Amino acid sequence: MIISGDIPPSPAKNNVALLNPQSPLDSPPPPTYGATAGRTLPSQPQQYQPYIGSSSSSLPNGSRSISGLPTDVEGNEPIRRESPAQRFCKAFAVALLIYVLAAIFFGSFTMRYQTSKGWHSDFSIPNNIAVVSCTKGSEMQNSSLGWISSYSPESTLHTFTPPKEFSAKSSSLLPSSNEFNYGTVQTSLSLPLTSETLFILSRGRSSAGGLRIESSSDLEEGMARVDVKITYTDFAKYGNSYDLLSQTAVCLIQRKPGKRKQLGVGLFSSRDWPTSSYRRSQLIYDVTLVLPESRGPSILRLNAFETDLPNFHHLFSQPLDEFVTFGNLLLKAGNGIINAVSLTADNATIHTSNREINIKSLTSNSASLYTINSEIRGHFTTSHSLEIKARNTKVKADIEILPQYSTEGGHVVVQTTNKALEATINVHKPSHSSTSSESSSGLFISTINNNGIVDVSVPSLPLDSALNLTASTTNGRLTATLPATYEGTYALSSTNIFGEVHNGHTEDPAGLGRKRVFGSGPNKGVIIHNSVYWDERNKEKSVVILKSINGQAELFL
């Protein structure tokens, strides 16, 4: 077939596509094609030069080289192409690889961001506490350097023991700063007085310091303030490279669940605080709860105030009941002293260990005190119950029982081991009795000691009161003293050493001229059982039981 040069070339009818579309004006005449096995091949071998135009943009579809097309002439086989499934798998694998790499990169970024945002997860925060906001020590405001504790000997019975390096009494005598880093930072948080419970807690190996409570007229209405000052010493040159201030935080916290408004302040230090070093770096917290001054005859009342401060001292040098009373008061200070001049609460719980509890005056409906390895002493007034429990320590308690109603009794329990137990218990007339002849349903007193003496005294007891007193000890002497108003039975038992009863009080406390009757039983022996009374109707009204093992028991009537 002959094709004129004036007519544009057309594709062969054997369905082979044009290999080099180009302008009809510049293209040479096409070669002669033959037919072989349904395919079009050149009739003889010859080299084709691809068309090179002036610009691919001048062509309908742009230039394309023949050499770029897949051919397999010598193999005489169909052209191999990847199936759609293979292409999909390759594309999917590439996309998956990109996704994984992106996830690793952005995931690491997100983790770093979350770690920086949720840094408080590195601190020893209890599971039942939700963190509202926090301030790291490194973010706090610098404070004037003051190494002398605000808990001075004149105001309290105890002062903080500073590090040996700070035994000097003035900052001018401090070691030079080229030996270690030291300083003081501070921050403040506000708490609403309408909260059901206000509380302060600390967690962490480095948490130690003191708490006090003061009043101020410079407060936002309806708010309390917690001031926190942190004094730090960082012995960086002795191998401790920790940035101490970044390892501690002061947080506004809420107790879970959030149904009840229980807001507080948390003092936290890092879980990774170093456990040992040549010179351990130290933090001392000076915490002050500031409450509004009372205005008018009424004073502030807090529904509940709680502390959970291991290694903290509670040093209340002011009479707190002059400006605040508490519904529920809970003070916990393991390894910390609890000293108070005057406290008033409906219910009080005071616990510590290895340090003393010294309460000059505590007034409550019910109270519980506990410590080990250090003394409990104080003056306690209760209308319902009092429990004092100690181990390996001396207990010295002056107790006033003020029943609110004539039909109500009271419970007093005093226990210790290995040291002396001394309790003086005055029982007063019920504050709401209608007549002087009404008696309470019963007052129960229990004093127990192991390996120590017991000395319990009841100097005053209303007329016609029912008293149930039990005192016991091992390896120690036991002494009980009762007032003239006591009427009832008594029993003494001892081992190895005779017990003894001393009779006295011959004047009628009612002023009726009655004679006191003493039972006819023995007044000395290992077992004594007898009675004493002014009115025979009260012969068995009260009971006193004294038990001693390897010690003498004595009763003074």
Image: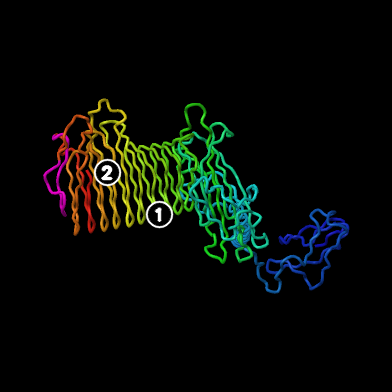
Quadrant in which the C terminus appears: top left
Image color mode:
rainbow
In this rendering, the answer to whether 521 lies above or below 192 is below
Residue under numbered circle 1:
374
Name the foreground residue: 511 vs 442: 511
**Magenta region:** 518-536
* Circle 2: element type: strand
- In the rendering, which numbered label is found on residue 456? none
The crowd level at tag 1 (other Cα within 10 Å; few <14, some 14-19, many 20+) is many
Q: Is residue 20 magenta?
A: no
Query: Circle 2 sits on which residue?
Result: 445
The quarter in which the N terminus is drawn is bottom right
Give the vertical position of 496 relative to 385 (above or below). Answer: below
The residue lying furthest to the left in this view is 520
Towards the viewer: 11 or 303 = 303
Q: Are marks 1 and 2 in contact (CB under 8 Å)?
A: no
- The image quarter containing residue 172 is bottom right
